[in-house]
Image (tube, rainbow, N blue to C red):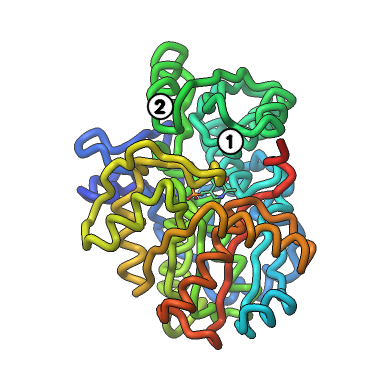
């Protein structure tokens, strides 16, 4: 049976059949994105409401054959929480938090890895490798176990110990590297070349983006098919940002939503802010950040492969990019805990601190509908 989607290079528009395994575009090195032959009819919105399950409720929007069972642990379907005490403290009456800490493996990485492992296993893969700042490694380890496959995770030696324990606990082979995720990527590509493992690095395969797209689909449904004004997203490799923007443009194209799309804002840490720097410079690509450092491990991505796609989404949406200090992001994570009972990761704290800074700087109005993402659970970062 032919697949109902193809792959299209995000730069040179090379288009090819999606059967089999695919890395980046062989002619220009840019990521492939999934392109569907047709998008679901708006009439499906009613049927969605009575379906159970998280991410794979959206299967018509996703790269899954009709007869195929996904590799799933119940990911997705996370709450969009109102946060009245934080809203009052900051004078932001329409602030809410999409709490991704409730996913299997404690972060929204579960969404992307569920989709990527499903597709690779469907194409016959039984061995995986990923370079990670931490959470992608936990998710790959769990979804590989779920698929009966073997995983190698390459992580920085200074990754929080709980995260490393989780990776080992799910049975992955763990390699520690003195360096950051970029250094881990070099090692992961060597592992892939020598073992034949499928490299599921951010945007080196096309399907993690599709899993992350469900962040945007869920948000649209939770907002009664009328999207918020502003999205504030803690950005590392950019899958969430690129995936959500893909969701919104596909939803509009399919006639599921009308009107303006949200303004997308990236938040990064001051110690590693390649997207913020490129956005401010008017550049269309990111230059590698020297000596990246931040306690928000997921944001320590000095040279994201998806830089061009992120910058495009930020500009097309009329959004922006802002950096916050580690002190500010930790304090904001503490406020999410203490004022609202949300187990925020440092990255989730960064999103909140970024939203507050964007309002203070006049880029966002206080009465706008603002959604910040708590991308992972705080317990993973305990010393
Ligand atoms: C990976 C990660 C991020 C960054 O996400 P991208 O989609 O790669 O930009 C943010 N927060 C947490 C907790 C993460 O694990």
Image quadrant where one finds the C terminus: top right
Mark toward the start of the polypeptide (2 vs 1): 1
What is the secondary structure assignment of the residue under circle 2? Answer: helix
Quarter-wise, where is residue 369 in the image? Answer: bottom right
- Looking at the image, residue 102 sits to the left or right of residue 291; the answer is right
- Residue 306 appears in the rendering: yes
- Relative to the observer, which residue lies in front, 337 or 145? 337
Q: Identify which residue is drawn at 32% across, 70% down.
A: 316
Q: Identify which residue is drawn at 43% across, 52% down.
A: 270
Give how far across and how far down residue 320 sits, in percent: 37, 68
Q: Circle 2 sits on which residue?
A: 183
Task: Check disc 2: other Cα within 10 Å, few if <14, some if 14-19, many if 20+.
Answer: some
Is 297 situated above or below 180? below
Q: Circle 1 sits on which residue?
A: 134
- Residue 73 appears in the rendering: no
Quick one: which residue is furthest to the bottom in this view?
367
- Relative to the observer, which residue lies in front, 14 or 23? 23
Give the number of the disc on residue 314. Answer: none
Is 206 situated above or below 262? above
Task: Check disc 1: other Cα within 10 Å, few if <14, some if 14-19, many if 20+.
Answer: many
User: In the image, is the residue at mark 1 within 8 Å of ligand 1 by its beta carbon?
Assistant: yes
């Amino acid at each position: 049976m032919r697949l109902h989607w193809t792959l299209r290079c995000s730069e040179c528009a090379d288009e090819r059949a999606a059967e089999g395994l695919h890395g980046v575009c062989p002619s220009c090195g840019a990521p492939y994105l999934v392109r569907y032959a047709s998008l679901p009819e708006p009439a499906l919105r009613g049927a969605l409401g009575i379906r159970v399950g998280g991410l794979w409720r959206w299967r018509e929007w996703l790269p899954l054959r009709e007869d195929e069972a996904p590799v799933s642990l119940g990911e997705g379907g996370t709450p969009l929480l109102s946060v009245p005490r934080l809203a009052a403290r900051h004078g932001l009456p329409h602030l809410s938090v999409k709490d991704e800490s409730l996913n299997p493996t404690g972060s929204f990485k579960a969404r992307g890895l569920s989709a990527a492992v499903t597709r690779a296993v469907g194409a016959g893969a039984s061995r995986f490798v990923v370079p990670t700042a931490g959470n992608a490694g936990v998710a790959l380890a769990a979804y590989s176990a779920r698929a009966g496959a073997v995983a190698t995770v390459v992580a920085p030696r200074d990754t929080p110990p709980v995260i490393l324990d989780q990776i080992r606990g799910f049975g992955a082979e763990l390699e520690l590297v003195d360096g950051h995720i970029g250094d881990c990527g070099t090692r992961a590509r060597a592992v892939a070349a020598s073992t034949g493992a499928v490299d599921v690095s951010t945007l080196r395969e096309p399907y993690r983006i599709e899993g992350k797209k469900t962040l945007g689909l869920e948000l649209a449904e939770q907002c009664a098919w009328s999207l918020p004004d502003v999205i504030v997203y803690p950005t590392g490799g950019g899958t969430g940002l690129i995936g959500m923007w893909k969701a919104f443009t596909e939803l509009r194209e399919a006639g599921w939503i009308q009107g303006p799309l949200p303004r997308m804002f990236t938040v990064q840490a001051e110690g590693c802010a390649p997207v913020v720097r490129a956005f401010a410079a008017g550049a269309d690509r990111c230059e590698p950040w020297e000596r990246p450092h931040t306690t928000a491990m997921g944001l320590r991505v000095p040279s994201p492969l998806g830089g061009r796609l992120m910058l495009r989404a930020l500009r097309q949406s009329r959004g922006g990019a802002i950096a916050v200090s580690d002190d500010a992001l930790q304090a904001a994570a503490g406020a999410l805990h203490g004022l609202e009972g949300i187990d925020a990761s440092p990255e989730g704290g960064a999103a909140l601190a970024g939203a507050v800074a964007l309002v203070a700087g006049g880029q966002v109005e206080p009465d706008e509908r603002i959604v910040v993402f708590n991308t992972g659970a705080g317990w993973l970062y305990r010393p």
